[in-house]
Image (spheres, rainbow, N blue to C red):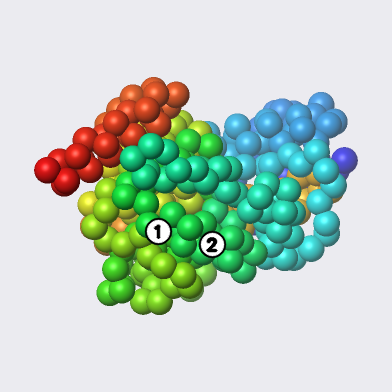
Amino acid sequence: MDNPEIINRTRELLVDHYVFPDVASRVVAVLTEAEAAGRYRDATEPATLGKIVTEDLQSINQDKHLRLKFHAEEQPDLPSEELMAAEARRDAQRGMHGIGRVERLEGNIAVVDVDRLHPTSISGEVFAAVMTLIADADGLVIDLRKCSGGHPGTVALVCSYLFGDEPVHLNGMYERHSDRTTQSWTLPFVPGKRYGPDKPICVLTSAVTFSGGEELAYDLQQLGRATIVGESTGGGAHPRVGFRLHPHLELTVPVARSIHPVTGTNWEGVGVAPDVAVPAEDALETATGLLRERLAEAAA
């Protein structure tokens, strides 16, 4: 394993791609100083080097998307976009496309566990089918307690089933390379049937909830569409690109940052704070209790 080459390539990619160029320069200095001090010299295993370098990458601003990620399985030697697509496709096929559970509880309350928001090009039909299935529920729980992230397009697709026909501005994304901000909106048309804009929703979160899962929770919270129940989330709001530096090491570099239309900011570093704070293991019971109270009030 050529550690000096891996460190050098890491520095180059940070300078060329990281969404915050000033932070990239400071992180490069940290890596250079650590290498000169021999910090990486004895890291002969990919997992060990990945762990040490990740600590240094995150030492300036604690960006959890910025890391040298170890993969137990050898990664294909592909361009970054194709590498990420291959990884997403493999994970989706092995994990029921990110859907952990769909269940109907007493009181016609639907529960959907979302473990990953895979790109719509891979899993869009699955999410459309699930959202159509729960459309006639009177209350909805979206369980994101195990959701490790996903794609903004899938966040928009899910949200499209939770509002009306009129498009709603969900989020903005500033990209360093284009120096432009693109907007994300709900869709005017969706396959199947909408749950709609009026029936109650609770979203469950934990400290594990991260990235795309956080965006789904944040968008619904800031737009007043859902009550967040559980714990503060992990705090990762910077979409990343992956670069293969070794058969078992992928450098993930954030290349953009979210800008929400309501807050003008995002959840990076602070997470999404719940509206009702309870331990993650109690969140489902708390949320279903809240939904039943609201449904009873509406019926009365």
- What distance separates the C-alpha of mark 1 from that of mark 2? 10 Å
Q: Amino acid type of disc 1?
A: Ala
Q: Position of residue 287 (x, y in %)?
A: 33, 34
Determine which quarter of the picture holds residue 173. bottom left
Reading the image, the residue beneath label 2 is 129
- Can you see residue 246? yes
Extreme-bottom residue of the structure = 189
Q: Are marks 1 and 2 in contact (CB under 8 Å)?
A: no
Determine which quarter of the picture holds residue 228. top left
Query: What residue do we see at 83% from left, 59% from top?
Result: 77
Give 139 or 231, whichever is nearer the viewer.
Answer: 139
Q: Is residue 23 above or below residue 171?
A: above
Q: Position of residue 207 (x, y in %)?
A: 46, 31
Provide the secondary structure element on which disc 2 rests. helix
Extreme-right residue of the structure = 1
Reading the image, the residue beneath label 1 is 135
Query: What residue do we see at 72% from left, 44% from top?
Result: 7
Q: Is residue 115 above or below residue 196?
A: above
Give the mark nearer the N terminus: 1 vs 2. Answer: 2
> Which numbered disc covers residue 85?
none
Give 45 or 187, whichever is nearer the viewer.
Answer: 187
Q: Quadrant of the N terminus?
A: top right
Q: Amino acid type of disc 2?
A: Ala
- Can you see residue 41? no
Provide the secondary structure element on which disc 1 rests. loop
Q: Quadrant of the C terminus?
A: top left
Determine which quarter of the picture holds residue 51. top right
How many labels, in total? 2
